[in-house]
Image (cartoon, rainbow, N blue to C red):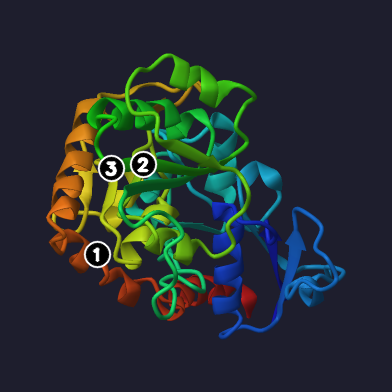
Amino acid sequence: MKHLVWVGHFRGYSGFATATRSYVRAFMRHYPDVMIAPLAALTPSDSFAPLVNEVPNHAFELVHHHPTTDPEADAYFSVVEYDRVLPEWEPLLENAKVVFTQSEYCRRIFEKVVKDPGKIHVVPYILPPGIPPHGRPPRIFPKDKFVVGSVFEWIPRKVPQLLIQAFIEEFRVSEPAMLVLRTYNVPVGEFERILQSLEGNKNIQVLQDPIPELGVFYRSLDCYISCTAGEGYGQTLAEAMACGIPTIGSRHSGNLDYMTDENSYLVDVGDWSPSVENPRQRWKLPKINSMREALRAVFEIWVKKGVNPRAQRAKSLRKRLVPWRASRVLWQALKPFLF
């Protein structure tokens, strides 16, 4: 029996860190001989710190990050948000014993460079603790405002300028609407520059401090929106939906594994175009008019104080995104290489 060494981010609130912690906890129910190699040092009090040990020879290494993190790893767990992987990923994915990802969209992209598609496995997302929160958490935003929220890292693929533009163009100053952006890594002056270029409703807040209790944040919203140029999965979209919040996302990429016109609001996107982040890869930009229509549709239900049927149907995600579903896929795929 081999030791499994799980390489990845175990600290912080990024999508990779959240998912890595959840998957390791779930997998250890089947296979306790797991060691971790965190990409950022852990404090001694961290619950994962006891799993950091000297890696024995012939251990099976799984990299839960970009494959280039360790080109010699046995397996990879990663996602892709564009129309293709980077060229440097191709031989690593082809030579890996096992490849894990989070959505059917990612599987299709990986299959373009892997001769044996049978070694690619889609692992369901696991809702982190506190999603949805227990009981009725206190509302942290004004009750008389239609509060639209979004959680993201300020990078080009998240197209924050399009979200801000759609909100400002759709809601008049006199309407009780506000936009709350829980974001980080905002370039100095970038948010102010966007606001100066637009006229209209400037009732927008930017929160850059970490929010450990995201469930409380989601449940304080009247609408969640994350319309991006591409998602490997779209974790915050799934989390908001599980909390029963009307959710708006792009009609494109990994989030279509669970978002439909019946349980959410899907925004139209444009054709493939070169991404700003890497011209070798293409993305699809969400259309501002479609974003505005979705925001208005949710707002009109809120004004009437009605129950949003799509948000009610979205709650069923809670039953799908549970640890045992993910651990079963991981266990069945890894078992032949661990014994």
Q: What's the amino acid at mark 2?
A: Met
Name the residue that disc number 2 marks: 178
Q: Is residue 123 above or below residue 297?
A: below
| x and y percentages locating residue 243 in the rendered image | 35, 67
Name the residue that disc number 1 marks: 314
Left or right: residue 289 versus residue 154 is left
Q: What's the amino acid at mark 1?
A: Ala
3D distance between C-alphas at marks 3 and 2: 7 Å
Left or right: residue 307 versus residue 109 is left
Secondary structure, mark 1, is helix
Q: Is residue 298 above or below residue 45?
A: above
Q: Say whether disc 1 or disc 3 marks the residue closer to the N-terminus.
A: 3
3D distance between C-alphas at marks 1 and 2: 23 Å
Name the residue that disc number 3 marks: 176
| x and y percentages locating residue 333 in the rendered image | 49, 70
Q: Residue at x 56, y 77 (%)?
A: 27
Q: Residue at x 34, y 46 (%)?
A: 148
Please tell me how crowded label 1 is: few (under 14), some (14-19), or many (20+) other residues with Cα within 10 Å. Answer: many
Viewport quadrant of the N terminus: bottom right
Between 88 and 206, which is closer to the camera in this rendering? 206
Between 236 and 23, which is closer to the camera in this rendering? 236
Number of numbered discs on residues = 3
Between 211 and 326, which is closer to the camera in this rendering? 211
Secondary structure, mark 2, is strand
| x and y percentages locating residue 44 in the rendered image | 85, 71
| x and y percentages locating residue 334 in the rendered image | 55, 71
Q: What's the amino acid at mark 3?
A: Pro
Q: Which callout, 1 or 2, points to the residue nearer the camera? A: 2
| Res. 71 visible in picture | no
